[in-house]
Amino acid sequence: MNSPLDAAVAAALEGRDRAGLLRRRTAWRPTGPVTVERDGREFVNFASNNYLGFTHHPRLLAALRTAVNVGSGAAGLISGHSAVHATAEQAIAEWKSCEAAILLPSGYQANLAVVQTLGAIANNGIEKGGVRFLIDKLAHASLLDAVRLGGHAFRIFPHNGLAKLERLLADAPKEQLQVILTESIFSMDGDAGDLVGLAELKRRHPFVLVVDEAHGSGIYGRHGAGLIDELGVREAVDVTVITLSKALGLAGAAVCGSAGFIQSVENFGRAYIYSTAVPPLTAELATEAVAVCREEPQHRHRVRMLAKRVRGELAAVGLIKFTDQSADSPIIPIVLGEPARALAAAESLRDEGLLVVAVRPPTVPPGTSRLRVTVSAAHTDEQIKQLIAALSLVPSPGTPGEG
Ligand SMILES: Cc1ncc(COP(=O)(O)O)c(C=O)c1O
């Protein structure tokens, strides 16, 4: 007889399946920075965040081989923090032009730690009115989850909707700390946060600005420091979150900010405090990945050039709107509408030996299921041509679909 859990599991999964939203992992075997294999067939990978090809960079593979110990053995405040971690945190802070940085096991956890820290500070008597988070509608799930889990007051503002944001700020009680949560490059849309507009807004209203630079780091700015650096708005940003898992080709994350804020994360960021410190191996690789980013600009130049080329070609066949001629982030969404349509398009690309994922609700809003194409500096010109040829056969969003 089915246990109550089995029955609940079956009902939940059936519901997802009926809506065309059931998810399933595939066990791929990576065969290079942009190729994966399954059942003897190789696919070109346009579905990874390995924007610079660093997962297979020779310098990082060499650093991997000389590692002394694998795990850190304890949380950072116990004995897990080491000189190797301190070196990596300093390298990241200098790269980001911040006073300090702190490593965490994932970007999800880093965002949780930032929100926990801000919540604790605001409720600690420094700001008597508590805190309210103002979240861009398209901000990553980890930011929203962090705020909801903490039970904090929050408002979601329209994507890059600065007029609405200004009204919310103008009406906010003086003693309540206002915190804006946004991204530099949005993970599912590949467009940029209006960081210049936010910097201007900050001249008129007091607020804390937190920017998740998961997808801008390594691609933009001097030495790949990120979009904040490229736009010259560093002074307006209080806290930056970076992941090591995207352009840097590793896993893990860092929170960057003032020395005082980073010390606050050590004291109030429960997601940091109660979790084992990242492996020293990760820290060592992070130091090396930042050094490679500084010393080898050719990777970010190439990925931006390829991203711009792909956008131009897809706009020419009506698959995307390409209004901003400078748009060159590696994330290129092709919005197709209903889940079945995105799944069918992904399947037809798979038949051509190309791996592109269909992203469906709840990751993206209903009616905006899409192909999320990501390009990498490691893609060859030939692979890019293959992608464009195959995508040109996908019915454009205006064509009636199967719903
Ligand atoms: C914008 C953004 N923030 C945070 C994360 C979470 O990072 P991680 O995968 O390291 O948990 C991701 C993606 O995974 C992301 O796209």
Image (spheres, grey):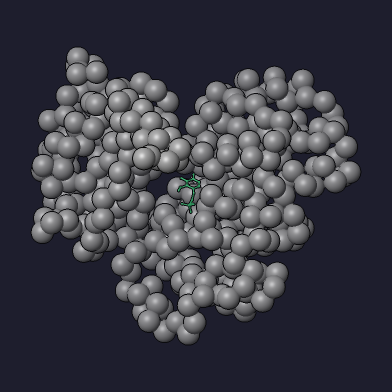
Front in this rendered view, residue 381 or 371: 371
Up the image or down, 337 lies above or below 254; here it is above
In the image: residue 226, left or right of residue 400 = right
Q: Quadrant of the N terminus?
A: top left
Which image quarter: residue 34?
Answer: bottom left
In the image: residue 34, left or right of residue 275 = left
In the image: residue 105, left or right of residue 219 = right
Residue 76 percent location from the top left of the image: 65, 69
Residue 134 percent location from the top left of the image: 65, 31
Specify whether residue 305 is in view: no
Residue 163 percent location from the top left of the image: 62, 20
The residue drawn where x is 67% and y is 30% is: 154
Front in this rendered view, residue 119 or 56: 119
The residue drawn where x is 73% and y is 45% is: 118
Up the image or down, 56 lies above or below 110; here it is below
The residue drawn where x is 21% and y is 64% is: 31
The residue drawn where x is 32% and y is 60% is: 53
Front in this rendered view, residue 105 or 34: 105
Specify whether residue 115 is in view: yes
